[in-house]
Amino acid sequence: MTTTLYTSDHEWLAIEGDVATVGITDYAQSQLGDVVFIELPKLGRALKKAEAAAVVESVKAASDVYAPVTGEVLETNDALAAEPALVNSDAQGKAWFFKIKIADKSELGGLMDEAAYKAHTA
């Protein structure tokens, strides 16, 4: 079963076991506008919670994507390098950024469920 949680910085996490797939929310991409470039973290990189993990650049701005939890990068979505606009068309689906092995599941406690995130962005 997959659990989806959200950060106040507009990242989403789809959690399966001890692995989280991370991306930016549809709200975030709508604020950024047309995405033109994405820099993903290196495989095997150790990330601390709230550390800048990736960069997304749009016609409006460049923005960091933060690690929502501490862990190791297991996989990156190479399709985004070739087609960064996927973020605009499917931010919470095909346009995931990276997968991270969760080091400490207690860090998930400070994240929001979908209802709380919707209230946060209202």
Image: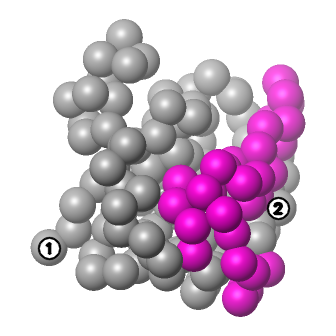
Q: Residue beneath label 1, please?
A: 1
Residue found 25% across the figure and 40% down from its top: 113
Residue found 75% across the figure and 81% down from its top: 45
Q: Nearer the viewer, residue 106 or 4?
A: 106
| Farthest top residue in view | 122
Q: Position of residue 104 (x, y in %)?
A: 43, 71
Q: Residues within 10 Å of mark 1 (few under 14, many from 20)?
A: few
Vertical placement of 63 versus 79: above or below? above
Which one is in front in this view, the residue at disc 2 or the one at disc 1? 1
Is 84 left, or right, of 23 in this rendering? right
Magenta stretch: give its range: 42-71
Vertical placement of 17 versus 28: above or below? below
Residue 38: quarter of image: bottom right
Quadrant showing the N terminus: bottom left
Is 118 left, or right, of 38 in this rendering? left
Q: Residue beneath label 2, please?
A: 39
Vertical placement of 53 versus 114: above or below? below
* Residue 46 lies in the magenta stretch: yes
Is 47 left, or right, of 49 in this rendering? right
Looking at the image, do the residues carrying marks 2 and 1 touch, with CB atoms under 8 Å apart?
A: no
Picture colour scheme: one colour
Q: Position of residue 83 (x, y in %)?
A: 72, 62
Provide the secondary structure element on which disc 1 rests.
loop
Q: Mark 2 belongs to which amino acid?
A: Glu
* Residue 22 lies in the magenta stretch: no
Q: Nearer the viewer, residue 108 or 19?
A: 108
Q: CA distance from mark 2 to mark 1?
A: 29 Å
Q: Position of residue 26 (x, y in %)?
A: 47, 36
Q: Position of residue 116 (x, y in %)?
A: 26, 27
Q: Nearer the viewer, residue 72 or 4?
A: 72
Q: Residues within 10 Å of mark 2 (few under 14, many from 20)?
A: some
